[in-house]
Image (cartoon, coloured by chain):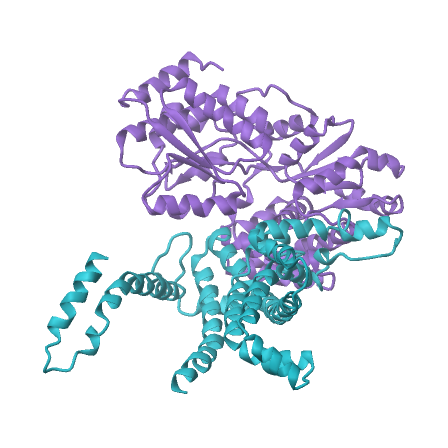
Amino acid sequence: MKLTTKLLAATAIVSATSAGAVDLEVMHWWTSGGEAAAVQEFATAVNENTEHNWIDGAIAGGGDVARPVMVSRIIGGDPPAAFQFNHGLQAQELIEAGLILDLTDVAEEQGWEDIVNPPSLLDACTYEGRVYCAPVNIHSWQWMWLSNAAFEEAGLEVPETWTEFVEDAPALREAGIVPLAMGGQAWQQNGSFGVMAVALAGLDNLLAVNRDKDASVVRGEAYGQVFQAYADAREMAEGLDVQDWNQATNAVITGEAAAQIMGDWAQGEFAVAGMTAGEDYSCLPGLGEIAILDTGGDAFYFPVTGDPEIEAAQKEMAALMLSPEVQVAFNSVKGSLPIRGDVDLTTVNDCTQKGLDLLANGDTMPSGNQLLSPDTTNQLNDLMTEFWNTPSMTAEDAQERYAQIIEQAS
Amino acid sequence: MAIAESADTVAPERSAPQKRPLRLFRNLSSKIALIPMIATAVIVFMGGTIWTVVYSFTSSGLLPRLNWVGLDQYERLWGTTKWIISIQNLALYGICSLVLTLVIGFVLAAMLDRKIRFEDAFRTIFLYPFALSFIVTGLVWQWILNPDYGVQGVVRSLGWESFTFNPLNNPDIVMFGLLIAGLWQGTGLIMCIMLAGLRGIDDDIWKASRVDGIPVWKTYTRIIIPMMRPVFVTAIVLIASGIIKLYDLVVAQTSGGPGISSEVPAKYVMQSMFGGQNLGQGFAASTMMLLSVVIILVPWALLEFGGRKRG
C-alpha cells in the first residue's frame, strides 16, 4: 500500500513543520470483526507512511457508549488526537466551543472540495465556512434486502418494488415465511420508517419535514400513506422476535424471513455467509420506488491540543485518511463506499455497483444525522418503536405525535 | 494520622480547666479525621446534586450551558410517554422486587438456619449470582428466556408443543422477565444478611419458645422477625437503592424493549443525556428521580432513625 508520490509530496509539506514522531491516540467504536479489520488499515497507513504512531483507542458498545467517553475526555482537557463521529449535527456544539481543530488549510491544500463526492459530505463537515472533519466513508440507509430462496419457496418472482412486495406478503405468509424481518431496536424501526417515507412520499416531502421542520407535511396525505404502509409493515413483521439488526439479516439469509429494510452495512453479513448478490439475495435501493441514497457515514474529528507538533501530525493524518489508496483499502474491508468518486474498489458486486451508480449520477440526499439533531432523532426513535410494538396504536395517533415532535424540533 | 494525633494533644490545652469545653472541640481528633469525608460529601455529592438541579432549568445540549428555559424541560418530561411508562415500570418492579426479595431471602435463610446438611454448599450456590455483574445476569437470562433456545424451546422439544413462555417479547409481562433475573441475582445477598441476623438470635430464645410450646412459624413471625428489625432495615435500604438505579440489567436483557415497554427512569436519563445529547432533559429526569427518593426516604428515615434517638 504505497502512496502516490503526489500525496507524499503533499504530506511532506504538511509535515515540514513537524519536528518529530508523535503518538496519536485515535478513539472510535469500530469493534466488530469487519470494522476492526478496516480500522487496522488506517493504523497501518499511519504507521507506514508517517513517522507517527497510531495508538488504538477503541471503545466497545457502539456510538452511544463511546460518544460520552470522547466528549468527557475532550471537555476534561485530555483529548485524543482524533475521534470518530457521525458527521452532521452531533459535533456542532464542540465546534462552537472551539474544541475542534480547523482543517480548512488541509482541505484547501488537498482540494477536498473537488474530490469529495457527493459534496454534501464535506458540507456536513463544514461549519460557518470552515472545515472541521475528515469524512472517511459513505453508508446509506435506503436499501431493502431480499432472500431469493424465500420467494422461490413461495412460488413467487423476486419483487422489484415495495408495492409488489406488499402484494406478495400474503403468499409468503401461506408458505410459512415471515415477509419482513425487523429487529427490536428503536433505531432500526425509525430508520426503516425514514426509508419508507422517502420511497413512498418522495424526496420533497421528506426534506420539508426533516430539513424545514414543516409539521403540516407530516399531517398531510402523503405522509398519512406512509404511516399506513408502516402499520401494514408492522403486521408483515409479526412472528419473528429478534433484537439486533444482524439477527434480522440472518433471518433473511436463512430464508426464514423474505426481506429486510436495512442500510448497506447489512451486505457485510451476506458476504460473511458466503452469499452472492443477484443469485442468493437481491437488493432494492430506495425500495425500488425511488432512485436515491442518503449519504451518511463516519468522519474523524481532531480536537484542539495546543501543541503544534501534534497539530501538524493530526493534519497529516487527516490528509492520509482521504488519500486514494487508504480510501480503497479501508472501504473494501468495511463494505462501505469511498468518499471520493475517482477511486475503484477492489471488489464490487451487483449491489455495491448499484450504489456506486447512484452516487455517480448524483442521486443522493443528506442523511438523518445531517438534518435532525440527536435529540429529535432520539424522540422519533422512541415514538416509532412504541408504534411498532403497540398494535393498538393507530397510524393516525403516530402521525399526530410525529408532527408534534417535528414542531418542537429546532 | 499524624495530624489526628497532634490535634489530640492540642485539644485539652485549648479547653482551659475553668471554662466548659466548647462543643466544637469535643472529640476533635475524630472530627479532623472525618474532614476529608465531609468535604467529599459536601462538595461532590451536594455540589453535584445542586449543579444538576440548576442545569435542569437550562437548554443544555451536549455541553452544559446556562441558557435559562424555566420549566420547559420538566413540561416536556411529563409530556413524554416513555417517561410515564418508565415510572410505572419502576414502581411495578420496585414493589415486586422489594416484597419478593425480602420474602424469598428470609425463607431461604430460615431454611438454611434449620441446621441442614451441606449448608455451606447451598449458601455458596445462592450467593454466587451476586458475584456476577448485572450485564452478565441480563445476558444469561436473555438467553434462558429466548423463545427458540431457552425455556420455551426446551419444553416444546420435550413434547408440549403449545407451551408458551416468552416474556421478553411480550410488552405486557416483560417486566416480570426482568424481575426473575433481578431476583436471581439479588436474593442471595439478602439471604446472607438475614442468615447473619438469624445467627445473632440467642439460642435461649428458641429454647424458651419451645418450652412454652409456641409453634415454629409463630416464633418466627412474632419473636424472631421483630428482633431482626435492624437487619430488615439494612436489607430494605440495600434493595431500594438497587431498585432506583436499575439500569444495566435492562440494557443487557431487553434494551428497554419490546418498544418502550421495559424502559426505566435511569435509562431515560442516560438516553437523553448521551443518546439525544440533551443534558437539560437528562438533568430534569434525574432531578425528578432524586425528588421521588427524597419524598419516600426522608420521612421513613426520620421515623426509623430519628425516632429511636428520642426514645
Q: Is residue A152 left or right of residue A270?
A: right
- Looking at this view, is B66 or A37 the one in front? A37
Whether residue A339 is visible: no
Q: In which quadrant will I find the C terminus of chain B?
A: bottom left
- The answer to whether A292 is drawn above or below residue B261 in the figure is above
Q: Position of residue B253 (x, y in %)?
A: 63, 53
Q: Position of residue A125 (x, y in %)?
A: 43, 38
Name the residue at 54% across, 35% down: A31
Q: Which chain is purple?
A: A
Q: Is residue A124 left or right of residue A183?
A: left
Name the residue at 54% across, 38% down: A296
Q: Position of residue B107 (x, y in %)?
A: 66, 69
- The answer to whether B244 is drawn above or below residue A191 in the figure is below
- Looking at this view, is B176 or B171 the one in front? B176
Q: Which chain is cyan?
A: B
Q: In which quadrant will I find the N terminus of chain B?
A: bottom left
- Looking at this view, is B206 or A39 the one in front? B206
Name the residue at 11% across, 79% down: B17
Q: Position of residue A372 (x, y in %)?
A: 51, 49
Q: Which corner quadrant of the image does residue B221 belong to?
A: bottom right
